[in-house]
């Protein structure tokens, strides 16, 4: 998992409440057994005028010119600005996968659905909950100023606006530690690999029949 320390990125706004995970990554794309390739189908039903199918070449699709992520001013955005209850609906982990693989590293909103919120941290995506009034102000600034950037400093837990004003945000210490170091659940476990090997060796030494059982 990629480390998250300081991000300076272009901001793209999704000015809709209650954006659910089926909108983030529609159900037909969940058939893949791989953990990659979902970025091209992020917000698929909003980004395209035709119905998408798994494995379809994006170059053959008809983009919706009115959708925000198709507009030239938001190309390459790394920060998504959203409204309340972002990521509601089903618990699919594909939603943060799609956002991260599209190029987003952080999502700012007044509130998030719980399961989506947890899944973001497990996949290197930082969800930041800010007061609705602060999010409103950011929407005004993003729409008013093309090329609007924010800086997110995870260590200091600050969102720094273009003019230098700072907005503090909360993050649970363990989640912060994992993001700063790029540790997902597997990486956290592998940090104890010496202890795991020692335990396995000791267990097989005292219970050698387990080796034969596992080989069957």
Image (cartoon, rainbow, N blue to C red):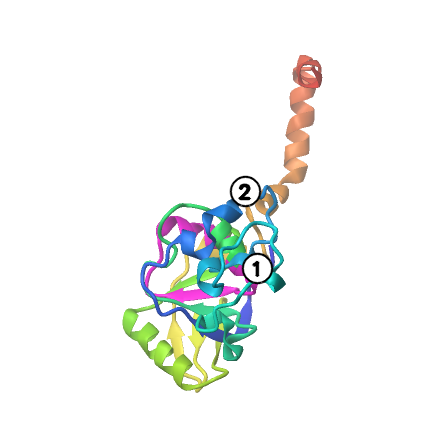
Considering the numbered disc 1 on the image, is that residue within a helix, a strand or a loop? helix
Residue at the (45%, 84%) spot, across then down: 162
> Is residue 113 covered in magenta?
yes
Choose between 78 and 1: the one closer to the eye: 78
Q: Is residue 44 visible?
A: yes
Q: Where, quadrant-wise, is the N terminus in this rendering?
A: bottom right
Choose between 107 and 156: the one closer to the eye: 107
Give the total number of marks visible in the rendering.
Answer: 2
Magenta segment: 99-121
Considering the numbered disc 2 on the image, is that residue within a helix, a strand or a loop? helix
Residue at the (33%, 61%) spot, across then down: 111
Q: Which residue is mark 1?
A: 40
Q: State the CA–CA distance, disc 1 to disc 2.
A: 15 Å
- Judge from the rendering whether residue 134 lies leftward or rightward of residue 158; answer left or right: left
Q: Which residue is mark 2?
A: 31
Choose between 184 and 119: the one closer to the eye: 119
- Judge from the rendering whether residue 179 lies leftward or rightward of residue 200; answer left or right: left
Above or below, 8 against 3 in this view is: below
Choose between 32 and 78: the one closer to the eye: 32
Q: Quadrant of residue 76?
A: bottom right
Q: Quadrant of residue 196?
A: top right
């Amino acid at each position: 998992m990629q480390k998250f320390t300081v991000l300076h990125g272009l901001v793209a706004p999704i000015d809709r409440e209650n954006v659910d995970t089926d909108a983030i990554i529609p159900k037909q794309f969940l058939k893949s057994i791989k953990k990659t390739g979902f970025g091209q189908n992020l917000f698929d039903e909003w980004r395209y005028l035709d119905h998408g199918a798994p494995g379809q070449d994006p170059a053959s699709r008809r983009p919706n010119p009115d959708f925000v992520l198709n507009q030239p001013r938001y190309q390459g955005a790394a920060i998504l600005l959203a409204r309340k209850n972002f990521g509601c609906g089903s618990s699919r982990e594909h939603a943060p996968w799609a956002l991260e693989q599209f190029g987003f590293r952080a999502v700012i909103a007044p509130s998030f659905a719980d399961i989506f919120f947890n899944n973001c941290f497990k996949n290197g995506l930082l969800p930041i909950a800010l007061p609705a009034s602060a999010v409103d102000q950011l929407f005004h600034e993003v729409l008013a100023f093309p090329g609007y950037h924010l800086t997110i400093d995870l260590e200091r837990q600050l969102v720094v606006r273009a003019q230098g004003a700072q907005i503090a945000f909360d993050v649970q210490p363990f989640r912060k530690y994992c993001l700063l170091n790029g540790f997902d659940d597997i990486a956290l476990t592998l940090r104890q690999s010496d202890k795991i090997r020692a335990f396995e060796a000791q267990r097989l030494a005292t219970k050698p029949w387990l080796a034969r059982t596992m080989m069957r």
